[in-house]
């Protein structure tokens, strides 16, 4: 398997649903149409990232990584130590920001808090990219970040840079190349294996602590082909369709809160220490 060619990590509740966030109000740094620009991304690492991601994220690779990392036996840290660890990373799949990860997470959670959402959703915003610590355990970024998609069935052309799937060994596998592949029709996303990365990892890490809508936000926030493009409807069940509104509620905060201006962590820390203490244990296993 080809190594990561990039030189370093730095190279890369019900009534509330009636008022979805206004993306223009969140996007203070630039116009909303300038985000997720994959035609002419600001960093040339983005396209190469997706070439690697789509080539090597096979069904068998996902099973291997689930077995390898979901034991959570590598490290135990407080949330704050984990953020210090995470701050070594800049995400090469993201064309919209090169701030460190805590700054992006605070921008997301603060935008959620300003709009008056429940505190568990603020916490979800703070924690949603914590799974990117996988990069710091030696994983290449193409196996950690970027848009996610189902494996074990035909790839959708709604996935960004879908042309790169032609080099994936699963692409012409007769077991995987049909729309349903190894899955039953309308089986539900909980029975579908997604491409491996930080979404699934942080979901598994926090699944005992955050309400179900927040867990969907964590698990599927990078599944843009579903929540933005409407793809893979043949795999959804009624629970997925009910939870979609929560993922769509979360997405603008994740995407449009990105700004070059970093939050004032010293001022914000007491609030977030109390919030983390309310929902999470004193240490998390990674």
Image (cartoon, grey):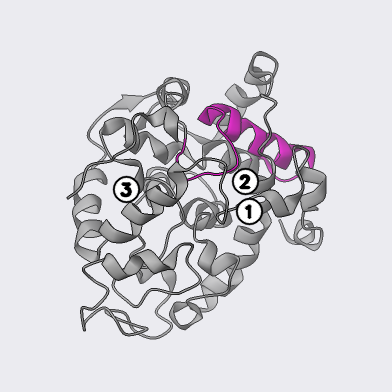
Task: Find disc 3 in the rendering and name its residue.
Answer: 143
Q: CA distance from mark 1 to mark 3?
A: 21 Å
Q: Nearer the viewer, mark 3 or mark 2?
A: 3
100 to 72, vertically: above or below: above
Q: Residue furthest top?
A: 266
Left or right of 266? Residue 48 is: left
Q: CA distance from mark 3 to mark 2?
A: 20 Å
Q: Which residues are magenta?
A: 91-119
Label 3 element class: helix
Task: Find disc 2 in the rendering and name its residue.
Answer: 254
Mark 3 surroundings: few (<14), some (14-19) or many (≥20) residues within 10 A: many
Q: Earlier in the sequence, mark 3 or mark 2?
A: 3
Q: Nearer the viewer, residue 125 or 137?
A: 137
Mark 2 surroundings: few (<14), some (14-19) or many (≥20) residues within 10 A: many
The C terminus sits in image quarter: top left
Q: Nearer the viewer, mark 1 or mark 3?
A: 3
Task: Find disc 1 in the rendering and name its residue.
Answer: 251
The answer to whether one can see residue 67 in this image is: yes
Q: Earlier in the sequence, mark 1 or mark 3?
A: 3
41 to 103, vertically: above or below: below
Q: CA distance from mark 1 to mark 2?
A: 5 Å
């Amino acid at each position: 398997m080809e190594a990561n060619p990039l030189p370093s990590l730095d190279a890369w509740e019900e009534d509330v649903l009636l008022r979805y966030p206004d993306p223009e109000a969140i996007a203070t740094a630039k116009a909303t149409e300038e985000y997720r620009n994959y035609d002419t991304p600001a960093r040339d690492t983005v396209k190469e990232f997706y070439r690697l991601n789509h080539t090597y994220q096979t069904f068998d690779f996902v099973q291997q990584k689930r077995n390898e990392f979901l034991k959570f036996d590598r490290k135990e840290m407080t949330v704050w130590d984990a953020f210090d660890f995470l701050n070594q990373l800049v995400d090469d799949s993201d064309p919209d920001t090169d701030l460190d990860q805590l700054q992006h997470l605070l921008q997301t959670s603060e935008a959620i808090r300003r709009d008056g959402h429940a505190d568990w959703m603020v916490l979800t915003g703070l924690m949603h990219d914590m799974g990117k610590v996988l990069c710091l355990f030696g994983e290449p970024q193409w196996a950690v970040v970027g848009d996610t998609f189902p494996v074990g069935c035909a790839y959708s052309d709604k996935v960004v840079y879908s042309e790169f799937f032609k080099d994936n060994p699963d692409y012409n596998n007769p077991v995987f190349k049909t729309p349903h592949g190894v899955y039953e029709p309308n089986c539900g996303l909980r029975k579908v294996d997604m491409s491996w990365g930080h979404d699934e990892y942080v979901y598994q890490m926090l699944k005992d602590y955050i309400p179900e809508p927040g867990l969907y936000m964590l698990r599927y926030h990078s599944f843009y082909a579903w929540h933005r493009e409407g793809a893979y409807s043949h795999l959804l069940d009624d629970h997925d369709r009910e939870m979609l509104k929560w993922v769509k509620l979360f997405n603008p905060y994740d995407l449009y809160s990105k700004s070059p201006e970093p939050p004032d962590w010293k001022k914000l820390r007491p609030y977030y220490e109390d919030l983390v203490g309310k929902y999470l244990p004193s240490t998390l296993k990674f």
